[in-house]
């Protein structure tokens, strides 16, 4: 189980670059960034599909019911990006981050009842600790006064974005048991790309004629956050419980904060609340991923 957890850790570090690279893309509209990010990620995967005969054959033989499920997950992924990024323009950062990262609360119980994944008392406590860490990090940095920027619409969008993230994780955990990561990622990303393209047209977000500089940044975003982030994360879902994978994503704010500090052009020194909240999140991740008895260890080994 060391490799899946190592892959999961690398994926969280990689997605932590997303916020930094998106910041460098300003003032490109958020929906446009989301569309090109997924488009470039899909195009990066395409040569591996063409060169890998086994994957091509798998794509041609995927059952219709499974293909339909992956299509739905593609819609959900597109919805997550569209809803969450849009929420940032309509509510406070504090509200958006807290609401969108609350998906472990959703993923834990659902994975227990529908995926039959064990969730011990110590794991449930770990989920609660991690969410408390996010609240500490965000409220400490932005304060209660930031909630004066709230709108009902923005908060609803952030909540729906968090629900979409949770469903994306749960769907990936279920399907990745039978579908290779290349086939899964290609179908899901392709569907999400087409969906975001349509969303961009509906909301008049530009889908061409960007500055070359922004194309290059978004391409880097696709490579780092898309391939080494989401795709590696999807690979780990075959081996790691959905509740654990969901909580690991709470490490993204920590990574983004550290990157914002070490990158000279940004150099945002983390506050005591970022350090404290980050420590609480890491503690929660430890408890959530902890195997509480020998039976849990045997069950996880069996999934391999």
Image (cartoon, rainbow, N blue to C red):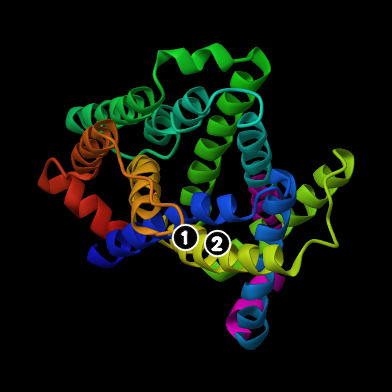
Part of the protein shown in magenta:
53-74
| Residue 6: quarter of image | bottom left
Compare residues 257 and 16 and report the one nearer the observer. 257
Left or right relative to 100: residue 5:
left
Q: Position of residue 22 (x, y in %)?
A: 58, 52
The circle drawn on residue 140 is none
| Residue 167: quarter of image | top right
Could you tell me if residue 93 is visible in this image? yes
Mark 2 crowdedness (10 Å alpha carbons): few <14, some 14-19, many ≥20: many
The circle drawn on residue 229 is 1
* Numbered disc 2: secondary structure: helix
Q: Who's the residue at 32% across and 24% down the image?
A: 140
Q: Who's the residue at 37% across and 57% down the image?
A: 13
Image quarter where the N terminus lies is bottom left
Up-down: is 199 above or below 210?
above
Q: Position of residue 68 (x, y in %)?
A: 71, 50
**Residue receiving disc 2:** 226
Compare residues 130 and 110 and report the one nearer the observer. 130
* Numbered disc 1: secondary structure: helix
The answer for how far apart the CA atoms under marks 2 and 1 are is 5 Å
Could you tell me if residue 41 is visible in this image? no
Queried whether the magenta region covers residue 236, the answer comes back as no
């Amino acid at each position: 189980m060391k490799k899946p957890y190592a892959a999961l850790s690398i994926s969280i570090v990689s997605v932590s670059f997303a916020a930094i690279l998106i910041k460098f893309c300003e003032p490109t509209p958020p929906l446009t960034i989301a569309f090109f990010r997924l488009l470039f990620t899909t195009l990066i995967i395409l040569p591996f599909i063409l060169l890998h005969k086994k994957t091509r054959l798998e794509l041609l033989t995927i059952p219709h019911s499974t293909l339909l499920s992956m299509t739905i997950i593609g819609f959900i992924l597109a919805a997550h990006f569209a809803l969450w990024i849009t929420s940032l323009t309509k509510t406070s950062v504090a509200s958006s981050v807290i609401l969108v990262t609350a998906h472990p609360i959703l993923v834990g119980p659902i994975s227990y009842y529908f995926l039959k994944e064990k969730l011990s008392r110590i794991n449930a406590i770990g989920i609660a600790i991690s969410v408390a860490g996010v609240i500490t990090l965000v409220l400490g940095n932005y304060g209660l006064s930031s909630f004066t920027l709230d709108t009902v619409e923005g908060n609803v969008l952030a909540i729906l974005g968090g629900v979409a993230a949770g469903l994306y994780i749960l769907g990936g955990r279920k399907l990745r048991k039978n579908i290779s990561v290349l086939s899964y990622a290609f179908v899901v990303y392709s569907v999400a790309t087409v969906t975001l393209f349509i969303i961009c047209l509906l909301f008049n977000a530009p889908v061409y004629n960007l500055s070359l500089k922004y194309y290059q940044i978004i391409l880097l975003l696709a490579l780092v956050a898309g391939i080494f982030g989401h795709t590696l994360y999807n690979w780990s879902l075959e081996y790691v419980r959905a509740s654990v994978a969901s909580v690991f994503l709470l490490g993204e704010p920590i990574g983004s904060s550290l990157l914002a500090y070490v990158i000279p052009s940004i150099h945002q020194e983390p506050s005591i609340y970022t350090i404290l909240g980050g420590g609480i999140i890491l503690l929660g991740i430890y408890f959530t991923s902890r195997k509480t008895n020998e039976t849990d260890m045997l069950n996880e080994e069996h999934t391999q």
